[in-house]
Image: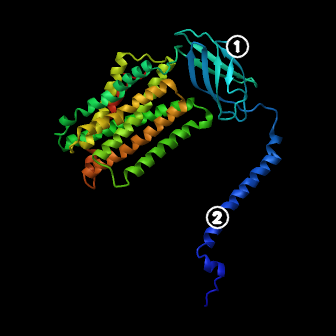
Amino acid sequence: MRDAPISETEAELPGTTAPRRALWWIILPLLAFAVAIAVLVSTNPLARFNNGTPPVEDIAFERVILGSDGIRVLVRAGGSEPMTIAQVQVDDAYWQFTQDPPGPLARGASAWIQVPFPWVLGEAHAINLVTNTGATFAHDIPVAVATPVATSSSLLSQAILGIFVGIVPVAIGLMFYPALRGVGRNGMNFLLAVTVGLLAFLMVDAIGDAFELAAESAAVFQGNAMVVLAAAASFLILMGIGRRNGAPKGLALATYIAIGIGLHNFGEGLAIGAAFAAGAAGLGTFLVIGFTLHNVTEGIGIAAPILRERIALWTFAWLTLLAGGPAVLGLWIGSLAFAPQWSALALAIGAGAILQVIVEVTAMMRRREGPDGNRLFSPAVMSGLAAGAGFMYLTAMLVKI
């Protein structure tokens, strides 16, 4: 059977017909969607369901600042329609207020509410916002203290605290490196299992804190979904990066462990900084020591994959800063610009990174034990898992406030 003749256009431009046809099949659905939206807006079929009920309104309190000029509150709207803040109550009394920017708040928009209220140091205060529909939204200040401002002195003090909470314990844990190099096969399995155990605790702790913070964020951020998606994306991206040249091991795996721990310490620093700003935490020497003890095992976990390698001193310094340094940054941001949704996002990303490390460390242990991997259930491994998770749980009791 003879082929059909080829047109001059097809002969001159070979291969152009299929891409053009594919482009039209992209444009046509978009045009159909635009027409459907235009019809919906012009006809407004939902109007017949309007029975006079007020729109759904929601306000999330993202930040409260106490200063010499009164109280400033950052709020974010999550209602179905623009909403107007009509009145502000503080401790059951109405106060004049200013709003920046002024006017109704659209869905997802934020504004600062300034109230010249003479707050009292150390006392509790209650803020209540009333919209023009009569809906009320309350927020409690458990202990009133002046919000820290970004001065060189305050930033230095927070940096010192962050060093003791994040960098010092990781450095102390890595100092066990020479002593741990002589461990045998069972000892190595025990240490790697300890790493998995402590990372599993950190992941569960981060996810729990992330969901708690997500519940405080505006509904528009869909807190729980945001946490799950961010953790999954972090895990998948790091798995893809880590496996691009094969499964990571040695220093590469230690670096991924440091990254995961660093992201968790960033979230931990955010929480400490926010607690300071809100006056909800008085971190005394005992609690700082508790944080240090709680995080010492992290350094041992970073050292476990590189016990069979010779590592330069500057590499230990880099791993220490990678794992512990984010605590300083988190403390600064938490005390000066805290918002629950961003803290939840940071913790979720950290949890995903930690899960990636758990998978890689477990895979390395399996490769070390051969294809059957029976020794993954040996007493050394099982006791290491219990020791890592148990130590983190017990020391966490010293720092939970």
Q: CA distance from mark 1 to mark 2?
A: 60 Å
Tell whether 131 sits left or right of 158: right
Q: Position of residue 110 (x, y in %)?
A: 64, 30
Tell whether 240 sits left or right of 189: right
Report the front residue among 378 and 94.
94
| Residue under numbered circle 2 | 23
Q: Which mark is residue 94?
A: 1
Name the residue at 42% across, 18% down. 153
Q: Secondary structure at mark 2?
A: helix
Report the front residue among 169 and 72.
72
Graded by Cα atoms within 10 Å as few (under 14), some (14 to 19) or many (20 or more), the crowding at tag 1 reads: few
Type of amino acid under label 1:
Tyr
Name the mark nearer the viewer: 1 or 2.
Answer: 2
Tell whether 257 sits left or right of 222: left
- The answer to whether residue 33 of the structure is visible from this angle is yes
Q: Position of residue 84 (x, y in %)?
A: 73, 27
Tell whether 87 sits left or right of 324: right
Q: Position of residue 386 (x, y in %)?
A: 31, 35
Q: In what quadrant of the picture does the C terminus appear?
A: top left
Q: Quadrant of residue 105?
A: top right
Instruction: Return the residue found at the far bottom.
Output: 1
Q: Secondary structure at mark 1?
A: strand
Name the residue at 82% across, 47% down. 42
